[in-house]
Image: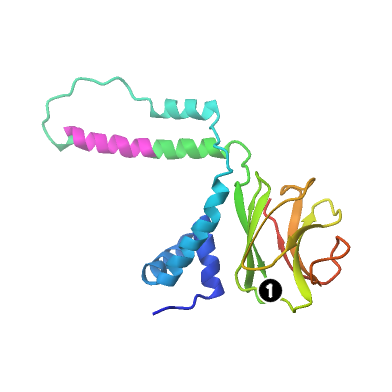
Amino acid sequence: MTEVLTPSQREQAAEYVLGTLQGAQRIAFEQALADNADLYAEVVAWETRLIGLTDSIEPVVPPSHVWRAIETAVALPAARPEAPKTGWWQSLVVWRSLAAAAMLTLLAVGITTLLQSPAPEPPPVYSLVLRDSAQQPLWMIVCDWRTRQFTVNRVAAAAPDAEKSHELWLVRKDDAAPLSLGLLQGDEVHGALPGGANWRGTKALAVSLEPVGGSPTGLPTGPVLYLAPTPI
């Protein structure tokens, strides 16, 4: 039996693929995923949409001090001759298990400390959700802050009247004039930031209602309907 997915389920599918769905919500989603073929298909569709973004991400080599600290953390004393086995407390298997558990704990603490020391970089890819006044998700926007590219996927947004268009805008932190990122037409839109713009200098993304074909002035002329702040 085919089930019609709700906008909330579609949004959760996107967040699940992005890795931002956590805790009890993620567990509940995975339980639903096992019995819902349509939900599984939605997850696969999101994976297909987003996989292309990873092609443009350059590998990041950890700083040398991170590797040195890890090597120091995992260094073990020289092996000693094994004593005769007289009981479980001298069992090599037992002590290897305990040593492995202790080492994993040490690595977890050490790596967490190392990763928390420098100022964190924003993730290479993050998502924004444009919602209406009832918090209904309308569009999901996936932004790659390194390549300056973005993808907009329609979740539940209705098409405007025939003589109108939805136009996406970048609102800058320096309060300069907003920049058009194009029209929101169809279920999926791909684009890139215009010259001189970057995600770090972006305060929010917004959608305005414009004449068909977009703003004739290069600035919003109609009402700003929806706005989503950027996380960086």
Picture coordinates of residue 99, whole percent (x, y): 30, 34
| Rendered residue at 60%/50% (across/down) | 125
The number of discs equals 1
Say which element carries label 1. loop
Picture coordinates of residue 98, whole percent (x, y): 28, 38
Q: Is residue 80 left or right of residue 57?
A: left
Picture coordinates of residue 43, whole percent (x, y): 47, 63
Q: Quadrant of the N terminus?
A: bottom left
Task: Give the residues in magenta.
Answer: 90-104
* Viewer-closest of 73 and 64: 64
The answer to if 94 sits in the magenta stretch is yes
Q: Which amino acid type is shown beneath numbered disc 1? A: Asp
Residue 211 in the image: above or below residue 229: below
* Viewer-closest of 30 and 45: 45
Q: Label 1: how many residues lie within 10 Å, few (<14), some (14-19) or many (20+)?
A: some
Residue 35 in the image: above or below residue 126: below
Q: Which residue is denoted by mark 1 in the rendering?
A: 132
